[in-house]
Amino acid sequence: MENFRDSELWIKATELTRDIFYLSNMFGDDTLSDILRNSCMDLLAEIMQHFVWHDISKEELNANGILNRIETQILIAKGQHYLSSDEIRNFSKTIDELRSFCPKMTEHFF
């Protein structure tokens, strides 16, 4: 693959980030919004770094830990009634799809 931005992983991660940025504007908690947005940016940075630096020394992209953080923060937002059940389901589906890429990063990029 010539450009990581063409990968399904990158596209899904940017869609997740876009949706979280949009929906977190409606949260009544700026701290939770900031933490969730920062986690999304960490995810994108990890994907980019893995591709750009060809960091194949790692067996697995560190995205799983970041995805766990995002999922936990989404569940906190649910507990605060900031997100609907449908939004939670959509986020969970996207996060599960992103997790499916993590063990096989080199297959998707190289």
Image: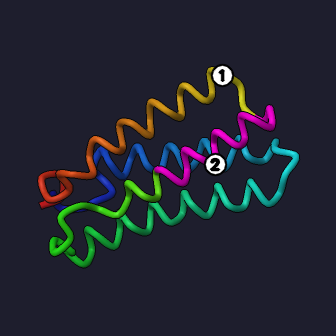
Q: Residue furthest top?
A: 86
Q: Quadrant of residue 54?
A: bottom left
Question: Is residue 43 within the magenta segment?
Answer: no
Taking 56 as reference, is 68 left or right?
Answer: right
Taking 98 as reference, is 110 left or right?
Answer: left
Residue at 28 percent of width and 60 percent of height: 4
CA gap, disc 2 and disc 1: 15 Å
Q: Which residue is mark 2?
A: 73
Amino acid type of the residue tagged 1 in the rendering? Ser
- Coordinates of residue 44 in the picture (x, y in percent): 44, 61
Q: Quadrant of the N terminus?
A: bottom left
Mark 1: few/some/many CA within 10 Å (<14, 14-19, 20+)? few
Q: Residue furthest bottom?
A: 53
Q: Quadrant of the C terminus?
A: bottom left
Amino acid type of the residue tagged 2 in the rendering? Gln
Q: Sequence order check: which comes first, mark 2 or mark 1?
A: 2
Decide which of 46, 64 is in the foreground and name it: 64
Mark 2: few/some/many CA within 10 Å (<14, 14-19, 20+)? some
Secondary structure state at the residue bearing disc 2: helix
Q: Residue furthest right?
A: 28
Q: Which residue is mark 1?
A: 85
The span picked out in magenta is 68-82
- Coordinates of residue 100 in the picture (x, y in percent): 28, 41
Q: How many marks?
A: 2
- Coordinates of residue 66 in the picture (x, y in percent): 47, 58
Question: Is residue 76 within the magenta segment?
Answer: yes
Residue at 83 percent of width and 57 percent of height: 30
Numbered label attached to residue 110:
none
